[in-house]
Amino acid sequence: MTHDVIIVGAGIVGAACANELSRRGMSVAVVDREWIGGGATAAGMGHIVVMDDSEAQFALTRYSQQLWQKLRAELPDDVEYEQTGTIWVAADEEEMVEVRRKRDYYRQRGVPVEELDADSLKRFEPNLRDGLAGGLRVPEDAVLYPPCAARFLMERAQQSGAKLYLDSGVTQIGGGYVRFADGVQMQAQFIVNAAGASAGDLTPGVEIRKRKGHLVITDRYAGFLRHQLVELGYLKSAHSVTSDSVAFNVQPRRTGQILIGSSRQYGAEHKEVDHDILARMVRRAEEYMPGLRAMSAIRCWTGFRAATPDKLPLIGPWPSDPSLWLATGHEGLGITTSLGTARILADQITGAAPEIPIEPYLPSRMTLWQTLKEPANA
Ligand SMILES: Cc1cc2nc3c(=O)[nH]c(=O)nc-3n(C[C@H](O)[C@H](O)[C@H](O)COP(=O)(O)OP(=O)(O)OC[C@H]3O[C@@H](n4cnc5c(N)ncnc54)[C@H](O)[C@@H]3O)c2cc1C
């Protein structure tokens, strides 16, 4: 079987790439060992968020958020896209300094934001505890339900002619071929590794570490929460590469349920819920919103983010194999950045001019990481 492009991975990134490439007239096949959105996509929180760890992270998250806004009218109801906005919650005056830095950074780049003092924070979210210093409201941030968003993107790809092969575990890719566990192989000019946290198993040399996360969902408590609320300390948690961390990060679902996150762990490769870290995460959420203590949790689960050393995704050609392309390494932002990833991957494959600079995401930068690891006298 021959296609222009074979995408390995039917998560939200693979689905978005399939949609973009098939709409540009390429013949596309998507293969997955499980089902659509069954990996990190099903485990993710679905916060569509602009972030500013680096200019490159900002560019991709903002670009992608605007692509979600453009797609909004076409999203089916079950994608549950809601422009709830985010409030970055500042616990004290030290964190208010960060609020103001973030406010200025976003404003300079055209992102609407609103600085909140303690009273206005309480007016927006009355169930936060007393005594918090304020926050930053980012009204264009949104939430959605990732598995349905992935399914929607895949269906659009299929309407444009893409073929989908589920229950199809891939053992090897490269040299223009995809080989399956049963020995069958498929051929394509371009093979896209969109296997999320497993991308490194298929392309040795791709530096992806699994970063485990836990989430809890409550029963329905309509009106308790309005925005996605994230403590500013979340940034410290997301940056820590040495220790397990938890942060207050809660999301209102359209159903009235509250999604409670989040944790980050390296070196924990098993899927099972870790009760210690789960308890720490829930305690942290209760510190910020004491009313959560009285609520029933109905399910908790884990998932694996695909983390790269520099916290940016890998989008583009793999230097040592002209047929092989990467669309992976999105860590905690792959739901947000799936649409931007698909655009810039398709731009590179079709020779179109990208709308944002692509250099920070190119996999060729991994050569630099390798060089940095070499001993100085080598
Ligand atoms: C707890 C948690 C919270 C998160 N919250 C957010 C959030 O709020 N906002 C946000 O933007 N992002 C969030 N993320 C990150 C987001 O979920 C991921 O970045 C995103 O889902 C990655 O999508 P993907 O398609 O690259 O990977 P995946 O969804 O993991 O898809 C990869 C697919 O590849 C398939 N596959 C792998 N190996 C093979 C093989 N050998 N053969 C065939 N198929 C294979 C898998 O079955 C899987 O379906 C969160 C993640 C976690 C874990």
Image (cartoon, rainbow, N blue to C red):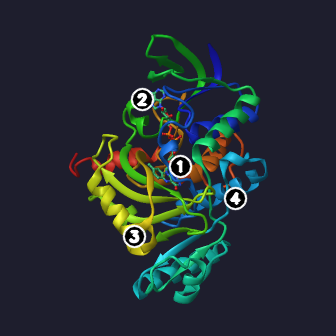
Q: Position of residue 237 (x, y in %)?
A: 37, 64
The residue at 41%/85% (across/down) is 92
Task: Judge by depth and name the residue closer to the eye, 151 or 319.
Answer: 151
Instruction: Nearest to the eye among marks 4 and 2: give it.
Output: 4
Q: Residues within 10 Å of mark 4 (few under 14, many from 20)?
A: some
Q: Which mark is residue 286?
A: 3
The alpha-carbon separation of the residues under discs 2 and 1 comes to 19 Å
Kind of residue indicated by mark 2? Leu
| Left or right, residue 147 beside residue 321 | right
The residue at 45%/11% (across/down) is 182
Which residue bears the numbered disc 1? Answer: 334
Query: Does mark 1's beta carbon lie closer than 8 Å to ligand 1?
Result: yes
Q: Position of residue 21 (x, y in %)?
A: 69, 35
Instruction: Nearest to the eye among marks 2 and 1: give it.
Output: 1
Look at the image and tell me whether residue 205 can be seen: yes
Q: Which mark is residue 66?
A: 4
CB-based contact (under 8 Å), mark 3 and mark 4: no
- In this rendering, the count of numbered labels is 4
Which residue bears the numbered disc 2? Answer: 202
Compare marks 3 and 1 and give the one earlier in the sequence: 3
- Name the residue at the top extreme: 183
CB-based contact (under 8 Å), mark 4 and mark 2: no
Compare marks 2 and 3 and give the one earlier in the sequence: 2
